[in-house]
Image (cartoon, coloured by chain):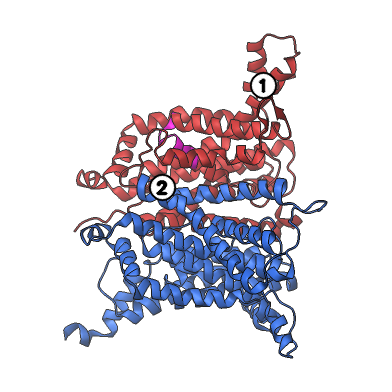
């Protein structure tokens, strides 16, 4: 019993750690897609940001400067996406694919050129990383459960984890209640109306892709210099796509998307802990099945078997101002 | 989709504009080469020598080209129906699984002449079946094929890891590989055919599947441009509502297009499993499915264009490997970067250069403007 509790608490803490980059990226995708711009380039922006933050942290020794640089880099890629899709009305999916592939290639090429070591950036000292804000010492097993929960699950994380979870109500408010959010949603559903009201569709969408980029930058920074101590090639390993799935799973809304991120994070945390464990009545659950569950669940959701996921109406359509 | 502005003569729209876009992609790649302190022209020379310098190089180049023709055609067929199949990677993986399972099951009983065609059917059928699910969901449940095919790539990858680690791994094997397929399941490689005729050729992975890829080019041309089904495909792609009024059922076309696309991608397994590896293993697709997107965009979804684009990417893959070997500053990922630039300039920014070409054309041919 005691052992189960310890495993359970550590799984929950791991869930928060794993879910953090997903939350950043899901919120990023949400802002972009509610404005009508499909973003399958979350993965690439996160990867580019991870590389930028690890490189800048290695050179400058400052985690904060690294964060800012990573956000700038991901925002630039967001602007590139905007330049292709908003200004030149290119295909949004194609542009996203391009950004993913360019990021995967460039981070490896530049990493090997600058640092050698197979594209890995130098290991960072503690000062150049985001470390736990409230260092918690291990509580003794006899402590009360709420106390242990507070210490072992909620405590002991770095700044970016808390930022990610604070971001959710912020995005919820921004999209749902602010003037900017109202216009953003309008531009994603019916851009003609926004244009008729004399508001620039393009500028609104550009702001959306920039916000999206900045948030992907935080996700990449978290991966490279908070969760890990260096960048390794292709370290995002599909998490941008899991975040995309989580955003769709949350039906393009902030809190449901958060719930999906936590669910997917929990599956990941559990998958590692269930490796080779016999479960009474079921036997061994294949780890690969648990790892594939986020994708399978999203497909089932999209098929309309768990409620209905309705995308913003004008999503994917470039806006052509009528003469 | 077509950019703003006036009409252009065909050779400008289909010739000059794509050429300018590819040139921009190559220039951007050249800038990256400069950035890592190397001479782009020297790199180009090494690359070309690495891809065409001798028969070995040429064999490898054409072996890569085979895969890119197939995945490029796969993306193109779906494109003509207005669908973006990002799932070529997963479909190729599962296609390889199909042919691998068939060859492993029957290689003791059947001669090559029966076994290999059956293997090709298995590869295509598995690829098609894996594309069928996203297609059906798009046609009847309205879930977007882009998202579902992305998800299916990951599902394919998880499935393969599970099968290889738990079921298909050869007893006592150190790597996660199946047992070797017996020679009756080996697709003849070019150098063995040449040897049978008394020619000496270096050993390369190039095999008969290149002929299949070329046949596919022809078949796709006949299907898309010379058949009623292809006509329906293009109508659904260009004007889905007109298709409905014309009595075409878009759902059926969607499913057919995706299944053909999946079959084409799946037959990458014919090259990789029957032609080269002769066993099932992990990650043999190695990004060929994604490269198919760049190939299709660059080749403008046209079989001839795809053939040329596939040859270019075959050159880049083989030449890039040689480049990484000769110049330590280079890595194979340089090819990935270039691939990304091609998708960016030939795909997402395809119409960026149209306005100035239109203006240039108007200025250079004022006589026709008046007449």
Residue bearing the label numbered 2: B137
Residue bearing the label numbered 1: A9
**Residue at 43% from the left image edge and 72% from the top image edge:** B220
Residue B329 or residue B96, whichever sits in front: B96
The stretch drawn in magenta includes residue A250: yes
The label nearer to you, 1 versus 2, is: 2
The stretch drawn in magenta includes residue A232: no
Outermost left residue: B371
Colour chain B appears in? blue
Residue B113 or residue B31, whichever sits in front: B113
Q: Is A35 placed above or below A11 here?
A: below
Give the image location of residue A55, x and y in percent: 66, 49
Name the image quarter holding the N terminus of chain B. bottom left
Give the image location of residue B30, x and y in percent: 57, 71
Give the image location of residue A50, x and y in percent: 61, 46
Chain that is coloured red in the picture? A
Q: Quarter of the image holding residue A111? A: bottom right
Q: Which segment did they paint magenta? A: A245-255
In this picture, residue B6 sits left or right of residue B179 = left
Can residue A143 be seen in the rendering of this structure?
yes
Circle 2 packing at 10 Å, graded few (<14), some (14-19), many (20+), is many
Provide the chain ID for the residue under circle 1: A
In this picture, residue B37 sits left or right of residue A168 = right
Taken as a whole, is the magenta stretch helix, strand or loop? helix
**Residue at 57% from the left image edge and 62% from the top image edge:** B123
Per the image, label 2 sits on a secondary structure element best described as: helix
**Residue at 56% from the left image edge and 55% from the top image edge:** B90
Residue A228 or residue B133, whichever sits in front: B133
């Amino acid at each position: 019993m005691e052992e189960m509790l310890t495993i359970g608490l550590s799984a929950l803490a791991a869930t928060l750690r794993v879910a953090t980059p997903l939350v950043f990226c899901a919120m990023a995708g949400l802002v972009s897609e509610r404005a009508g711009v499909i973003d399958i380039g979350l993965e690439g922006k996160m990867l580019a940001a991870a590389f930028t933050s690890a490189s800048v942290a290695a050179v400058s020794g400052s985690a904060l400067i690294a964060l800012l640089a990573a956000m700038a880099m991901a925002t630039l890629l967001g602007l590139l996406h905007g330049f292709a899709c908003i200004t030149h009305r290119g295909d949004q999916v194609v542009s996203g694919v391009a950004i993913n592939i360019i990021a995967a290639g460039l981070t490896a090429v530049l990493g090997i050129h600058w640092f050698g070591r197979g594209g890995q950036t130098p290991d960072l000292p503690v000062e150049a990383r985001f470390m736990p804000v409230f260092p918690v010492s291990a509580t003794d097993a006899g402590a009360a459960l709420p106390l242990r929960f507070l210490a072992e699950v909620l405590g002991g994380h770095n700044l970016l984890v808390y930022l990610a979870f604070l971001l959710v109500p912020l995005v919820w408010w921004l999209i749902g209640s602010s003037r900017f959010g109202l216009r953003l949603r309008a531009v994603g559903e019916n851009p003609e109306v926004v244009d008729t009201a004399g508001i620039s569709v393009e500028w609104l969408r550009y702001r959306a892709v920039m916000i999206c980029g900045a948030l992907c930058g935080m996700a990449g920074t978290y991966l490279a210099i908070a969760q890990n101590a260096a960048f390794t090639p292709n370290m995002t390993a599909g998490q941008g796509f899991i975040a995309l799935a989580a955003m769709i799973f949350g039906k393009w809304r902030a809190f449901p998307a958060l719930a999906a991120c936590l669910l997917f994070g929990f599956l990941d945390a559990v998958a590692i802990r269930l490796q080779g464990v016999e479960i009474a009545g079921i036997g061994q659950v294949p780890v690969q099945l648990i790892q594939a569950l986020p994708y399978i669940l999203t497909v089932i959701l999209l098929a309309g078997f768990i409620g209905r996921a309705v995308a913003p109406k004008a999503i994917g359509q470039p806006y052509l101002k009528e003469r | 989709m077509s950019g703003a502005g006036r009409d252009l003569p065909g050779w400008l729209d289909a010739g000059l504009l794509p050429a300018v876009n590819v040139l921009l992609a190559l220039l951007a790649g050249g800038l990256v080469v400069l950035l890592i302190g190397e001479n782009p022209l020297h790199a180009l020379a090494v690359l070309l020598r690495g891809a065409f310098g001798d028969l070995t190089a040429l064999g490898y180049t054409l072996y890569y080209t085979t895969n890119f023709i197939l995945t490029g055609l796969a993306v193109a067929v779906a494109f003509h129906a207005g669908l973006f199949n990002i799932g070529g990677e997963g479909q190729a993986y599962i296609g390889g699984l199909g042919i691998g399972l068939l060859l492993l099951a029957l290689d003791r009983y059947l001669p090559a002449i029966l076994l290999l065609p059956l293997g090709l059917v298995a590869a295509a059928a598995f690829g098609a079946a894996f594309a069928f699910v996203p297609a059906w969901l798009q046609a009847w449940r309205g879930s977007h094929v882009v998202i579902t095919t992305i998800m299916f790539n990951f599902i394919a990858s998880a499935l393969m890891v599970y099968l290889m680690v738990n079921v298909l791994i050869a007893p006592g094997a150190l790597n996660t590989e199946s047992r070797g397929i017996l020679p009756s399941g080996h697709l003849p490689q070019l150098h063995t055919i040449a040897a049978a005729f008394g020619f000496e050729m270096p050993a390369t992975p190039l095999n008969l599947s290149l002929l299949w890829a070329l046949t596919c080019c022809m078949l796709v041309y006949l299907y898309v441009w010379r058949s009623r089904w292809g006509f329906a495909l293009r109508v659904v792609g260009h004007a889905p509502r007109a298709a409905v009024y014309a009595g075409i059922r878009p759902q059926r076309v969607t499913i057919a297009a995706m299944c053909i696309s999946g079959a084409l991608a799946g037959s990458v397994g014919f090259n990789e499993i029957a032609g080269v590896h002769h066993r099932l293993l992990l990650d043999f697709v190695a990004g060929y499915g994604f490269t198919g997107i760049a190939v299709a965009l660059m080749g403008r979804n046209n079989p001839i264009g795809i053939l040329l684009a596939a040859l270019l990417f075959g050159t880049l893959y083989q030449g890039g490997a040689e480049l990484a070997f000769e110049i330590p500053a280079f890595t194979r990922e340089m090819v990935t970067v270039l691939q990304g630039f091609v998708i960016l300039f030939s795909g997402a920014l395809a119409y960026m250069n149209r306005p100035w070409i239109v203006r240039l054309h108007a200025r250079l041919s004022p006589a026709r403007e008046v007449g």
